[in-house]
Every structure is written in structure tokens, then in C-alpha cells.
Amino acid sequence: MESQSRLLLANVRGFVKSLVEDISNGRSPSIALERYRTYCFDPLGNCACSSDTPFAKDLIAIDKHPQAAHRLAGLLRVLSIVQQLLQQKKHASKRDIFYMDPALFVDQAAVDHIISDICILLKCSRHHLNVVPVGKGLIMGWLRFKESGRTVSCIKNPNTEYPIPVCLEDVEDIVSVAQYILVVEKETVFQRLANDKYCDKNRCIVITGRGYPDVPTRRFVRHLVEQLCLPVYCLVDSDPYGFDILTIYRFGSTQMAYDAKLMRVPEMRWLGVLPSDFEEFNIPDHCLLNLTPEDKRKVEAMLSRCYLHKKAPQWRIDDDVAQGS
């Protein structure tokens, strides 16, 4: 990790030096940022979205775009903060960074976008920059691990919740006698399983990202699957938002497509009531909720994603059935 920090610091200095040289030589500074994606809308799936290669470049050129100067100023400001964090071996959240210069950044979304740009520019992940999220994921079950030297023994009380580690690099010595991993969409379902002492009757690990999962939750699920070689299931609501959450775990998110290879879980299986089950098991209409126009638009957009054609055609069929609900 220390060698990675030294390399990043060297890359930051090299980048700033190249900008200074451009200005000194009368050239207008410009930056070319590669762009990645986890899916496109090619109905045949004839694309390279899952190959972890960039599909385009975004040029930040002051002489061509009036807004580029402000964008470059924001990027340099965050780079200076990251440089300080790495040099002092400290960490900060994206929210911390925003409040270091709110007049420049204007809103939180700008900081999020800049951090993604820096990750692409320096070819690294967010945690390498010492930028850490505020964790929200929870875990329980037949698992024990060390976090920063402290033992987290879920296995002693398998139905007790513990926070998911924010920094995966601090996790070591993972031990488990679980037979599978169950990821649930909602905290209410997680708490119901805890109250029902689900883990007393099932040797498993239960995780929730409490809705759309954050980076630590996705990284930890991926790490557990790799380390423990266990089957992993995802229990989500049978609606467009539950399905979207499922695809983020399995295929990665659009916002962090450049880092999808480190967080996606291709082994994840869809668990629960599938849309195709409605008719097969004669589920009464009064048990179903009609899709809103917004829901239907979301389903239509998801059905066009290329990875459903290539890697999960059955998921696409089930989601197509949901569109008619």
C-alpha cells in the first residue's frame, strides 16, 4: 500500500508538472480522460462493454470549452487534497473534501465526479487515494475476521449485526464455516432474519447494503466470494429497483464503470419471487402492485442493457414479464 501511495504521489507531481510546462510554453492545458461503461443498448450484445477497456475519451480543453477552466480548477484542488492525504497517511470522505472548498465545488456531485476523473487519470481505485466512504452495509452470520488488528467475531453471536469494514485493506484472517452468502436488498429484511434467528438454523453469512449498495459493501461481498469460494445469492424485491440493485452487485454500476472489475460478482444468483412466478404459482392480483409509468420506463431501459442479452438472458425474460405486471 505504501509503494502504491509513492507511485500515486509521483504521478500527481508528473501531471501537475506537465500542465505547468504547457502554460509556460504558451500552450493551452488539456486533459484526455478515458471513459468506461458497464453496458450499452446494443440489442445484439455485439460490444466490448465487459472487457474493461475504454470506449471513448473526454477532452478537457480550456481553449475549446468555457467551463473547462472551472472543471480543471476543481480537479487540481482535489488533487492537492489527495496529495496531502497520501503524504500525511490520513483519510477523508467525499463529504469532507466538499467542505474543504464548497465555494469552488458548489455541490457534492461535482466532488464525486472529480474523484472519478482522478481515478481514471491516475489509473487507480478510490481507496488508493485515501478517500473513504461513510459505510452503511451490515453483516451477520458464521464469520470471523480481523479489521485493523481487532477481531470481529460475528460467529459468536451469528444473529447480531456488525458494520461492514469501510477499508478492505484493513481486513485479514477471514474464517468461516458458512455454506453460502445471502445478500438482501433491504435493512428491514435483514432485521427480520436477525429477529427470526435465521443464522441459528442456517450456516450462512447475511449481508445488506441497505438499498443501493455502497462501495465497501460491494467490495466486501466480492472479497468474501473470492476468499471463501461460497455460492452467493441476492434477495431483492420483484420490482425495477430491486432488479437494478441486483445488476449493480453482479455487473457493476455505471458511475464507477472504470472500477467494475474490482467489485462485480459474476457468480451472484437471483433469489426470491421472480416475475415469471406470478402466473406459475397463481399469485392473486391483489398481492401485486401495478407498475407506475416511471417504473415501466425504467424496465424498458434495463431490458436494453447489453449484458442481459449476453450474460443473463433468463434475467431479461423475467424482467420482461415484470413489465407486463
Image: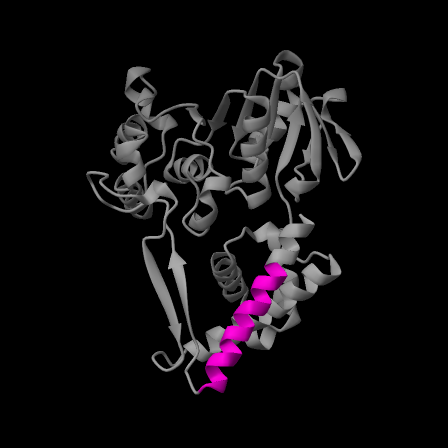
Q: Residue at x 53, y 42 (%)?
A: 213
Q: Residue at x 70, y 56 (%)?
A: 91
Taking depth in this image into account, of 229 and 213 the one nearest to the observer is 229
Q: Residue at x 69, y 66 (%)?
A: 84
Q: Magenta stretch: residue 189 in it?
A: no
Res 163 → quadrant = top right
Q: Provide the residue span drawn in magenta.
A: 8-25
90 on left or right of 238: right
- Please tell me whether residue 96 is drawn above or below residue 285 in the rendered image: below
Note whether residue 105 is visible: no
Q: Residue at x 53, y 29 (%)?
A: 183
Q: Residue furthest right?
A: 150
Taking depth in this image into account, of 165 and 109 the one nearest to the observer is 165
The secondary structure that most of the magenta stretch takes on is helix
284 on left or right of 231: left
Q: Position of residue 189 (x, y in %)?
A: 56, 29
Note whether residue 54 is visible: yes
Q: Quadrant of the C terminus?
A: top left
